[in-house]
Amino acid sequence: MDLHILDHRLRVLSISKKGLVNFTHPLIKLIFLRNQLQPSEHLNVESSVWLPLNVVSNGNASSSSQAVGVTKIAKSVIAPLAQQHVSVFMLSTYQTDFILVREKDLSVVIGTLEEEFNIYREVAGESVPVLCQDVSNGLQKNGKEATQPTVHPVLIPQNQFCVMSLDPDTLPSIATTLIDVLFYSNGPEEDAQSSPSRIKFFSFSLIDGYISLVMDTEAQRQFPADLLFTSSSGELWRMVRIGGQPLGFDECGIVAQISQPLADSDISAYYISTFSFDHALVPEEDIVSVTEMLQHQRKEPAAS
């Protein structure tokens, strides 16, 4: 398999809810016109620069119409990086999975994964093989002892979710609905009706011309059915939200803690990290097994 280091340098940021009204117009321009966001007191930016990685098998990005998401790379990528104390930020999309790592950790990442993968780096649109001598500071592993990750509480809301895509050419056709869902679906009435059994979650990603959306079935009904498409099975997903309070960015092993047992049980999963919490999406038919697995995991005594 091949591992590609994509030609992007990314930042992770959050907009405070009370400041969202100030960013409605800038975010619309960002989505539709690719404009940049300007600094603001309502914009919380994580300090690191992140690099996106993508696993490619047989010349194609790690994807299929019957997606299995992060479980495909749990053992080959996520677990080895956790053992080397490398923090990752996950973004599963309809098309593929992206693993974000801090730029400062790149040499450790390459040193950890070079035996498993042919590693390439995108340069001016071309995939260039990464050789040992190309990486500064050597390829030695970081020497940190992998600490036992904290077992965070999880929340399993009752919403049913869809993982969908959209032809970019039809994006203008849903622009009004998209703006309404993104910016005007969290008014006082909606907040009053929310409860731990249901959470508001909507993910829109536009990466290299490919659009991916994750939404619950209630939000899905607001969009034209003939424009959104999903896998041939039309599978519904349930969410596991990881973290009782914001997780931060320094702790390692959070993704591995969830994705590894799912992979061992051959359970498909999408995984989306956000500024505050992590979210795993599993097939609805597997939610009972996943719930039991997580309950058992949280009853086990911590390793000494």
Image (cartoon, rainbow, N blue to C red):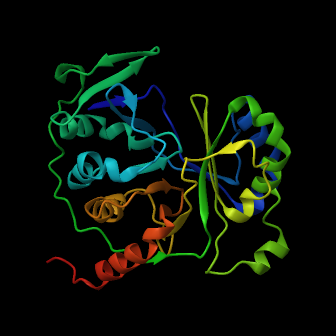
Q: Is residue 294 above or below residue 212?
A: below
Near-viewer residue (60 or 65): 65
Residue 64 screen position, x and y as percent = 44, 40
Q: Considering the image in quadrants, where does the N terminus appear?
A: top left
Near-viewer residue (233 or 59): 233
Near-viewer residue (8 or 235): 235
Is residue 19 visible in the rendered image? The answer is: yes
Q: In the figure, is residue 178 to the left or right of 83?
A: right
Q: In the figure, is residue 304 to the left or right of 124?
A: left
Near-viewer residue (171 or 267): 267
Q: Is residue 272 above or below residue 32?
A: below
Q: In the figure, is residue 105 to the left or right of 167?
A: left
Residue 84 screen position, x and y as percent = 21, 50
Seen from this angle, which residue lies furthest front?
A: 233
Write the residue at 78% across / 40% down.
28
The image quadrant that residue 286 belongs to is bottom left
Write the residue at 59% across / 76% down.
158
Instruction: Give the number of marks.
Output: 0
Write the residue at 80% across / 73% down.
190
Is residue 152 visible in the rendered image? The answer is: no
Q: Considering the image in quadrants, where does the C terminus appear?
A: bottom left
Q: Is residue 212 above or below residue 304?
A: above
Q: Is residue 239 above or below residue 115?
A: below
Residue 207 screen position, x and y as percent = 57, 34
Residue 141 screen position, x and y as percent = 16, 42
Write the residue at 67% across / 81% down.
195
Q: In the figure, is residue 176 to the left or right of 71?
A: right
